């Protein structure tokens, strides 16, 4: 007569396998640093794509960073041809958007690179954006990092804070267009020394 069922050894092997999977999987889910690494990698790849698109389409692009503490987000905008960096023009743009008869803004959302605004996951937030054209780092509002048709990028440093208050800095190199990650808070002036 055959008996159907599992032996104690079979049950122990299954439990050991499940325990190993849980031991490997749970720390990865709980590790908040993975979120900042993912965001940093996405911004690094996005910066390369923006630079390439700017060169190929002879357009000026800008990475827009909204430092809203409740919902920090970023997206990409495009303007045809070479454009000058003029902070006063951007302030005028914001005022014109409020008017009904206002002309369309110079920069428009580029849906080929970011289909919509990307919200930072978890408790990550932008705490500072600094470019060479700013008098002081921005800590609130909307900041722009420009990518030009010639292949140049506006030198910039973007600081991202994690839930445990550690800060990572993304540095955009103006000549190569590359972005690098520094696992501590750094200002653009300190980096350029």
Image (spheres, rainbow, N blue to C red):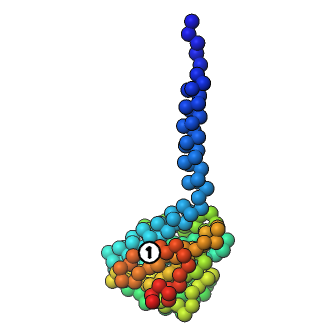
Residue 190 spot, x, y in % from top left: 50, 87
In the shown orientation, is residue 152 left or right of residue 182? left
Q: Residue at x 64, y 68 (%)?
A: 164
In the shown orientation, is residue 191 left or right of residue 73? left
Residue 168 spot, x, y in % from top left: 54, 73
Q: Residue at x 61, y 83 (%)?
A: 139
Q: Determine which residue is flagged by label 1.
A: 180
In the shown orientation, is residue 50 left or right of residue 118? left
Element on which disc 1 rests? strand
Residue 142 spot, x, y in % from top left: 58, 80
Q: Nearer the viewer, residue 153 or 80?
A: 153
Q: Is residue 163 visible?
A: yes
Q: Residue furthest front?
A: 9
Q: Residue at x 57, y 36 (%)?
A: 16
Q: Residue furthest top?
A: 1
Q: Residue furthest right?
A: 70
Q: Is residue 165 above or below residue 80?
A: above
Q: Is residue 114 visible?
A: no
Image quarter hosting the N terminus: top right
Image quarter hosting the C terminus: bottom left
Q: Nearer the viewer, residue 58 or 163?
A: 163
Residue 95 spot, x, y in % from top left: 60, 87
Q: Residues within 10 Å of mark 1 (few under 14, many from 20)?
A: some
Q: Is residue 116 above or below residue 152?
A: above
Q: Residue at x 64, y 67 (%)?
A: 163
Q: Nearer the viewer, residue 44 or 88?
A: 44
């Amino acid at each position: 007569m055959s008996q159907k069922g599992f032996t104690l050894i079979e049950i122990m092997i299954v439990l050991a396998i499940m325990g190993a999977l849980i031991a490997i999987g749970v720390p990865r889910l709980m590790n908040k640093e993975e979120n900042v690494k993912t965001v940093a990698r996405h911004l690094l790849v996005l910066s390369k794509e923006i630079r390439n698109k700017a060169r190929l389409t002879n357009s000026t692009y800008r990475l827009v960073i909204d430092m809203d503490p409740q919902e920090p987000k970023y997206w990409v905008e495009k303007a045809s041809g070479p454009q000058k960096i003029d902070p006063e023009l951007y302030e005028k743009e914001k005022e014109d958007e409020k008017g009904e008869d206002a002309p369309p803004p110079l920069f428009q959302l580029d849906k080929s690179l970011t289909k919509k605004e990307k919200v930072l996951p978890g408790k990550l937030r932008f705490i500072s954006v600094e470019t060479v054209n700013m008098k002081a780092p921005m800590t609130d509002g909307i900041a722009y990092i420009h990518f030009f048709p010639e292949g140049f990028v506006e030198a910039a440093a973007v600081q991202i804070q994690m839930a445990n208050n550690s800060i990572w800095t993304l540095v955009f190199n103006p000549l190569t267009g590359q972005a690098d990650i520094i696992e501590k808070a750094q200002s653009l002036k300190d980096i350029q020394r």
